[in-house]
Amino acid sequence: MKIYANYSIKGGVGKTSSAVNLAYLSAAQGARTLLWDLDPQGASSYFYRIKPKVKGGGGGLIRGTRALDDAVKGSDFPNLDIIPADISYRHMDLLLDEIKRPTHRLAKLLRPQAQAYDRIFLDCPPSISMLSESVFHAADALLVPIVPTMLSLRTYDQLIAFCKEHDLGKLKFLPYFSMADPRNKLHSAVMQAMPKKRKGVLRSVIPLSVEVEHMGVARAPVFSFAPKCVAAGAYKQLWKEVIRNLE
């Protein structure tokens, strides 16, 4: 079982749309796939038409009074299950702080899922927190979308520094450009410069796309309503690159 965390300190960088579409691609290949929407905003749950509600809330899952299996919901697509968001996830840091070894809690919860799933995707809220640390210890890789702007680059550097400081050097980073506009001179300049200064940047680029924005209207992955659009092709290339790097 592989665990992919779609993560960024910065919000509004295309993290959720990537989580939704990559989970879809994984399932479409026949892999048993689980997507856990850890963001209390519940965007991944919304895209997959799942009510953002977990019986017993995040507290029940973290404390172990509710089994993770009980929170799993089926999706409209074969091989793809969802653990929905819940508004109580906004207190996840406080819940984790109440237990022993909080930074290893998600790993402990997810480990038994290896019997049921080949891949797990975590759609994470944009923050650096106790929940983030727990995600870092659970994940095999962080898929980090970067809008080609200076602020987005700055938050990526902050993430790298934090993980080095907290002895997470074995964690695999898979950064890639997201919401990129080739007509924007700054975007083009950043995309040319960053791979020379920072190692491991994937070649795949997710474009700024009307079809991706339309996911909120269709409430579905882009492949279900615009499978031949440029963004769909970009997600396919990204997924192939992720697989080559990790699996």
Image (spheres, rainbow, N blue to C red):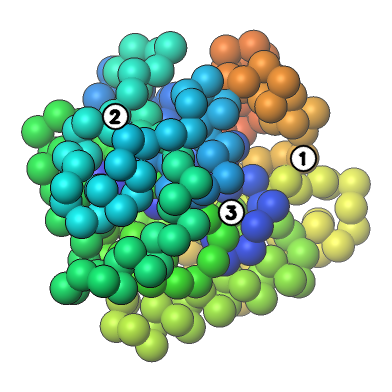
Amino acid under label 2?
Answer: Val
Residue at mark 1? 208
- CB atoms of marks 3 and 1 within 8 Å: no
Q: Tell me the distance, in whole angstroms, between the alpha carbons under discs 2 and 3.
A: 26 Å
The disc, 1 or 2, on the residue closer to the chain's N-terminal end is 2
Amino acid under label 3?
Answer: Pro
126 in relation to 110, above or below: below
Q: Tell me the distance, in whole angstroms, between the alpha carbons under discs 1 and 2.
A: 32 Å
Observer-nearest of 29 and 167? 167
176 in relation to 117, above or below: below
Q: Position of residue 242 (x, y in %)?
A: 41, 44
Quarter of the figure with the C terminus: top left
Q: Position of residue 132 (x, y in %)?
A: 41, 66
The disc, 3 or 1, on the residue closer to the chain's N-terminal end is 3
Amino acid under label 1?
Answer: Leu
Q: Tell me the distance, in whole angstroms, between the alpha carbons under discs 3 and 1.
A: 12 Å
Q: Position of residue 192 (x, y in %)?
A: 72, 62
Identify the element where label 2 is drawn. Answer: loop
